[in-house]
Image (cartoon, grey):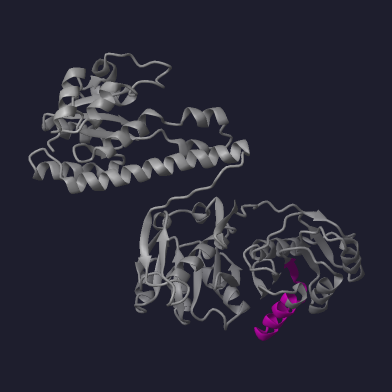
Amino acid sequence: MKISRALISVSDKTGIASFARALERYGVDIISTGGTAELLRKEKIPVREISTFTAFPEVLEGRVKTLHPRVHGGLLYKRGYPKHEAEARECGFEPIDLVVVNLYPFEKTIAKPGVTLAEAIENIDIGGPAMVRSAAKNYESVTVVVEPADYDSVLETMRDNEGATTLKLRERLAIKAFIKCSNYDRAIANFLNKEQTTEASFSISLPLVTKLRYGENPHQSAALYGDFDQYFEKLQGKELSYNNILDISAATNLIAEFDEPTVAILKHTNPCGVGSDVDLREAWEKAFATDKQAPFGGIIVCNRPIDELLAKAISEIFSEVIIAPEFEPEARTILQKKKNLRLIRLTTAPDETRSTIDIRSVSDGLLVQDSDGANAIPQNVVTAREPTQSELASMLFGWRVVKHVKSNAIVYAGADRTLGIGAGQMSRVDASRIAIWKAQEAGLSLKGSAVASDAFFPFPDGLLAAADAGATCAIQPGGSVRDKEVIAAAEERKMAMIFTGIRHFRH
């Protein structure tokens, strides 16, 4: 289908002037709206205002401008179908062969801090999705473009087909357009559902990133959906597995807790060790010293570019994945010797990789919650003895790590490192015992350490076990019916203790 007339109305004006100029060279009649028309005129590209095309003014502050029979008639009538052709002539419909629309930036609007409901509603596009749907429905004759990334493919196809587009291209762009509209409507519905606290259904639709070889186990099929690949770039190594992707997400969520140079090691999404130091090699040594057995086949993440010294150190053990914002050339040379090792470059800041919601499957349904983004650490000292500055630093370090350990979770920590980690136990005392045993196995002393617990100590026994191991201070949410007994046990052992009032269960 040769393109003779195009309707262009875009909020994201990236590349639109160059695209329109190329259309002009093909003799395309360009119709446009508002700011887009103004931009094209400034670029000296001939353009007709939509109000001239429809013979009807834009009204209601632009809310109604493309919702007109001449627009949708020009998009929807079936070319070559006698009944439609006759009605189009009778109604004066001029065919529109190309629609270029990207929608009002609703999702960017609601992402702004302090956005009001009124602001969000004003950024709900009506005319745009209507035009996109009309064009996509009639893709046998009409080309629809909803993303600047597709401008080049349209122009290349026109170049190869004497100003026409192919059915294959139109079909692909129509599918993309319907997905775009679906996601747009879903974002609006989910936002309003949350803002209005109205009971409604929850729906989700995500683009396929890639099919995976298998899931958690070889007999399970799996695929990755969403925007995962916008945050991570694989520089080398085998394709990512289902379990790799889970670990990468867990690793970046953990490292996002730290502003100071930090290295963390994870296995099966649980931290094995975390260390901070201006010298990344030292940070690695602190993390690795916590547990020298579990990291085999694990994930390493660093919030600074990996240099040659760090690469030499971490190359001494077998790892599945190494994640960093960058790898210096010398480091790449060392790590690339292990061809199966997956090197992952973070393309954004770690905190930008965090999802705002957690979704988990249950029997024939989904559980949906806000992600655990509580980064502030309230510090309510509940013991007579205040923690020293060193103890406070150790408590806060442990608290940032324990948030990412499966429950029941206990972390023993110093001011810049983990010393013992107990994860995923049915009893909090058992989690503490495992953390103590891990520290003993690693040859690390817990004398003067801080103990962090993801949930309250239900009985004094867990706290007393920590004190017996050498901990001099504790940080926990509080909230147990036996808090007074736990506080009394801390006083008896002359421990300082902080209640945060925030629990960090990870089931």
| In the rendered image, the vertical position of residue 190 relative to residue 264, given as above or below | above
Res. 132 in view: yes
Where's residue 226, x and y in %?
42, 54
Where's residue 457, x and y in %?
80, 66
Question: In the rendered structure, does residue 504 fall within the stretch colored magenta?
Answer: no
| In the rendered image, the vertical position of residue 385 relative to residue 173, given as above or below | below
Which quadrant of the figure contains the N terminus?
A: top left
* Outermost left residue: 162
Where's residue 312, x and y in %?
44, 77
The region drawn magenta spans: 431-452
In the image, 313: left or right of 19?
right
| In the rendered image, the vertical position of residue 314 relative to residue 97, given as above or below | below
Q: Which sits in the foreground, 495 or 101? A: 101
Q: Which sits in the foreground, 336 or 187? A: 187
* Outermost front residue: 83
- How many numbered callouts? 0
Instruction: State the residue at coordinates (42%, 31%).
Output: 125
Q: To which quarter of the image does residue 16 belong?
A: top left
| In the rendered image, the vertical position of residue 59 relative to residue 137, given as above or below | above
Instruction: State the residue at coordinates (9%, 43%).
Output: 161
Where's residue 492, x and y in %?
92, 70
Instruction: State the residue at coordinates (46%, 66%).
Output: 245
In the image, 204: left or right of 366?
left
Res. 413 in view: no
Q: Which sits in the foreground, 280 or 160? A: 160
In the image, 113: left or right of 395?
left
Which quadrant of the figure contains the C terminus?
A: bottom right
Q: To which quarter of the image does residue 335 belong?
A: bottom left
In the image, 110: left or right of 24?
right
